[in-house]
Image (cartoon, grey):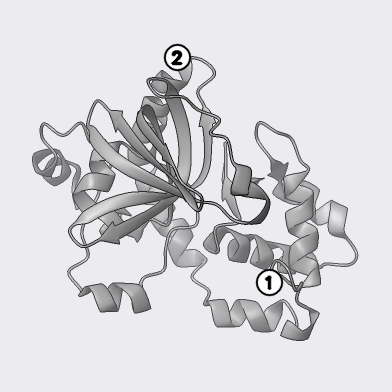
Amino acid sequence: MSWNNFDNSTAGEGGFMNTTVNDSTAGEDKANLKRGQNCVPVMIAHLVRYGEKLTVWGTPVRLVTFVGLVRKIEPTSTKVSFEFSDDTGNISGLKWLEGDTANYESPVKVNSYARVHGMIRDQGEDHYVLIVNIQPMDHLMELLSHHMEVTLMSLQGASMVNKVANNDHSMGNQSVQNGSVNNSNANSGLNRQQQMVLDIIENSDPEFGAERDQIKSAVAPNVPPQMVDEILEFLSAEGHIYTTKTDDYFKAI
C-alpha cells in the first residue's frame, strides 16, 4: 500500500504506520501468516482498528509496544485487567497471573503513564492486549520518543519487508536445525542451545540488550554462528526476545 493510500485510510485517527488488512479469512490467518519478529511501536488506534490483522508494510505483527495513560486497574485472583488511552483511542489490557505472580502488585497506578509490551488479541469484534510486560514511564520524554519510534517505523518499512523475506524460515526447519526435541528444557520448552542464547540476552545490557556478534562469541564453540542466527529468529518468532536499536541488538521480554 502506498503512503498516500495509507494517509487517506487513517485520516483523523492519529496513525503513522503503513498498515494493511489481509483479505483471507480468520482461519487462514491463523494457519498461514508468519508474524513479524520485532516488537513494533504502535498507537492505540492501530490496535483498535485492525486487531490481530494489523500489519506493518505487509508484515503481520506479533508483538507491540505502546505508551498509554492508565485509566483503570481491576485485579482478581487470576488476572489483572487494565484500561489504557492515548491521543488516538482506548483499549483494554489483560495480564494473567500464574505461580509466584499470584500476589502480583501492579507497578503502575491509575492516571499515570505506562509502557506496555504485549500481543494483540481479538474477542469477537473487540480487541485487547495480552500484556507481557508493563512498567511505569520514567520521564515524559519517553512519550515523545515513542511517537518518534512509530514514525520511524513507517519510514523503515521497506527494509523490514526485505528482511522478513530473506529470513522466511519455517518453525519446522528451526526444530530440525537446532537439535532433537529430546534435548529440550522441560520448563521453558527450549533446547540447550536455545536456552544458552536466551540466558545471555537476559543478562545483557539493560538498555539495548545483547549484540549478535557478542552472543556468537559468548556461546562459541558450543553453538556455531549460523545456528545462533537461526536461534535468534526462533526466539523472536516465539515472543521470547525483540530487537532494539538495530536488528542486531536483542532484549528479552
- Please, what is the three-letter code of the amino acid marked with disc 1? Gly
The spot of residue 227 in percent (x, y) is: 73, 69
Instruction: Say which of 97 and 46 sits in front.
Output: 97
Query: Image point 27% across, 54% down: which residue?
Result: 51
Res. 236 mark: none
Res 33 seen here: yes
Q: Is residue 179 above or below residue 48?
A: below
Snapshot quadrant of residue 81: top left
Residue that label 1 marks: 189
The spot of residue 50 in percent (x, y) is: 22, 53
Res 180 seen here: no
Instruction: Say which of 114 and 52 sits in front.
Output: 114
| Outermost residue to the top | 140
Q: Is residue 241 above or below residue 65?
A: below
205 to the left or right of 105 = right
130 to the left or right of 43 = right
Residue that label 2 marks: 140
Label 2 neighbourhood size at 10 Å, few (<14), some (14-19), many (20+)? few
129 to the left or right of 219 = left
Query: Image point 80% across, 56% down: which residue?
Result: 216
Query: Image point 33% across, 34% down: which residue?
Result: 84
| Circle 1: element type | loop
The spot of residue 3 in percent (x, y) is: 19, 42
